[in-house]
Amino acid sequence: MKRMAVLSLGFLMLLFAMGCAKVDTNEVGVKTTYFSFTGNTGVNEKAYGTGYHFYIPPFTDFSILNKTEQKLEMTKKPGEGSRPHADDLKLKTSDGNNLWVDITVSWRVTPQNAWLTVQNVGETVPEIEETAVRPIARGILRYALGKLSSEEFYDAGKRENQVLKGKELLNQAFAPLGIEITGVLVNDYRFASDYQKAIEDRKLYDQKAREYMSLTAAAGEDVKRKVFDASAEANRIIEDARGEMAQAKLKGDALLYTGQKQAEAILEQKKATAVALTYLNQALAGNGGPNVVAKRLADALKGKKISIVPMSDNGTLSMIDINRFLENMAAATVIKKANTAKAKPTVQTATTLATPPEDEKK
């Protein structure tokens, strides 16, 4: 009876001493055992999710960690970073120049490994950030970015590639601590003032050089385009000239063919005329030729009035009526014939009278 009373009293005391922890959706719980009848003490390798969880202090403890993404901002501008004063990352480039970088590191506690964070780092975000995230991140990023030379740091591609390598190194370092690095961002960077001026001048020179190269390339392309256009125009002119030459040749061939045919026709016509004239000459060379010529002449002159206008030595003109002249000639010819016919008997008589008889001669 007495034993039961003691047990009951101990149970009541345990109930009053038992603690209760509430874990929200953005949190993860971790339980730590300080005393156990079984001897299993230390941080429990288990993540406690959203809900209420009981523990018995001082034998056990319960830690609640924020599992959302956190940002560690290290910048030169006071009041804008995670610290109230200037906190930019200073490093040396591979060629020995000082460089200051404004950089942001995003991180979070991984829920399934939150017990590692409680065991090795701490239980609150400020504690975890100051104890592990900031010092480890600064050291690894100083090493990774210091692999670049001053000129390479201006190359966005090379710089980003080295940032990704730094992120990989950070995750390897933070994995045993139950922390994941979700992002690394370089916001700004600065060299020493004298070197910064030299770099800016070099960048300006390089920019001008690229502009001149671009203008040169553009001019070269313009020349190529103009040469191409001129070549195309020349080819067009040549083709047009060839077309016109072909048309002219066709036209010339047609004219030549027509001329040849016309010449052949004229030649044949001349040949026929020559043959006809040959036959005509042969006909006129015969006995009836003069009569034919006279008849043709008479037919040609029939019904026509012909006048001859001779000029005398003293420059006077005289008109001769050819028709009357021919009539007179014809009349003269008739008269002459008639006179000749009358004169023949008279001559014979005179001859007879002039010749003495043979008897008288004797």
Image (cartoon, rainbow, N blue to C red):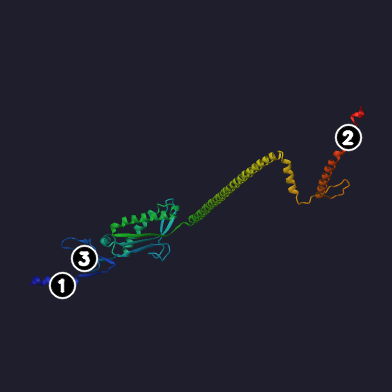
Give coordinates of residue 71: x percent, y percent.
Answer: 35, 63
In the displayed structure, would residue 179 be above or below residue 246?
below
Left or right? Give the position of 21 relative to 149.
left
Left or right? Give the position of 299 relative to 250.
right
Name the foreground residue: 56 vs 254: 254
What amino acid type is highlighted by mark number 1? Answer: Leu
Left or right? Give the position of 171 relative to 316.
left
In the displayed structure, would residue 21 be above or below residue 159?
below
- At mark 2, the secondary structure is helix
Mark seen at residue 12: 1
Q: Residue furthest top?
A: 362
Give the mark, 2 or 1, whose residue is nearer the N terminus. Answer: 1
Q: Which residue is mark 3?
A: 60
Q: Would you identify the image quadrant in which residue 351 lies?
A: top right
Give the mark, 2 or 3, whose residue is nearer the N terminus. Answer: 3
Residue that appears at 81% across and 46% down: 330
What amino acid type is highlighted by mark number 2? Answer: Thr
Q: Which residue is mark 2?
A: 352
Q: Quadrant of the C terminus?
A: top right
Gap in Å between the C-alphas at discs 2 and 3? 211 Å
Gap in Å between the C-alphas at discs 1 and 3? 18 Å
Q: Quadrant of the N terminus?
A: bottom left
Mark 3: few/some/many CA within 10 Å (<14, 14-19, 20+)? some
